[in-house]
Image (cartoon, coloured by chain):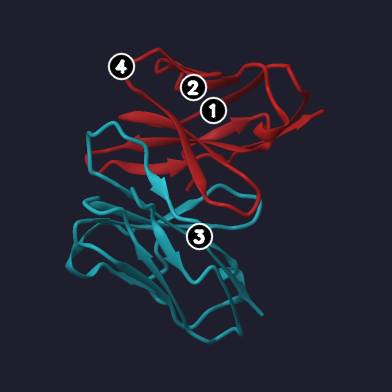
Chain colours: A cyan, B red
Amino acid sequence: EAGVAQSPRYKIIEKRQSVAFWCNPISGHATLYWYQQILGQGPKLLIQFQNNGVVDDSQLPKDRFSAERLKGVDSTLKIQPAKLEDSAVYLCASSPGPGTGIGYTFGSGTRLTVV
Amino acid sequence: SQQGEEDPQALSIQEGENATMNCSYKTSINNLQWYRQNSGRGLVHLILIRSNEREKHSGRLRVTLDTSKKSSSLLITASRAADTASYFCATVTGGGNKLTFGTGTQLKVEL
């Protein structure tokens, strides 16, 4: 089965610019997650979708970050405007849904550097 | 916020030795999962243990869960240089099955 696809792999932008990341989850997976991982730390959940609805976005900095999941499949995460502290790896993950007892599958991530 | 705290933060052992990592968490869980992350790469799921299970095995991995102490441990037996990576515990909580990661343990296995 194909894995979780993310693009781009790397992105360098200047502060105050905008950037967008794309994620294509495993086919049929209802739940999709975006995580931010700062170097040396564990991943921090930004937003969780169940199909195309938001389940949890309590840690998403909504003044600059936005995310959508159109038709319950692909998802995009946008940062506008970017700050230096947004430099991190952005990970997308998907799972079949609650109660399946299956681990989540992660993409390779997008490494963002804000200069 | 981080749900789990892992101990130790870093661990260095010789090939063939066993490696033990511990994870403590704060709230009731649905299940607990362990992931491995090689430098600069994505997270790979290793093993999942449900809240009503106490021990689980997968190959050279053994996971224990003590819900009364809100803690879990991951044992890697007969370690190999290829096991060098960061290891994270992650808890699944709530009706929405939120997956929250710990701080991680950096394991280095030397030849």
Do badges 2 and 4 share one subunit? yes
Q: Position of residue A88 (x, y in %)?
A: 58, 64
Q: Position of residue A53 (x, y in %)?
A: 19, 61
Do badges 3 and 4 share one subunit? no
The residue drawn where x is 40% and y is 12% is B54
> What is the CA distance from the residue labelled 3 to the residue labelled 1?
25 Å
- Of the numbered discs 2 and 1, the one sitting upstream in the chain is 1
Q: Is residue A14 visible?
A: yes
Q: Amino acid at mark 2?
A: Ser
Residue under circle 1? B23
Q: Pinpoint the chain carrying mark 3.
A: A
Q: Please tell me whether mark 2 sits on a helix, a strand or a loop.
A: strand
- Residue B52 - label: 4
Q: Position of residue A20 (x, y in %)?
A: 43, 77
The answer to whether B19 appears left or right of A10 in the picture is right
Closest to the camera, between mark 3 and mark 1, is 3
> What is the CA distance from the residue labelled 2 to the residue labelled 1?
5 Å
Q: Position of residue B32 (x, y in %)?
A: 40, 29
Residue under circle 2? B71
> What is the CA distance from the residue labelled 1 to the residue labelled 4?
17 Å
Residue at far front of view:
A1
Q: Amino acid at mark 4?
A: Asn
Residue under circle 3? A109
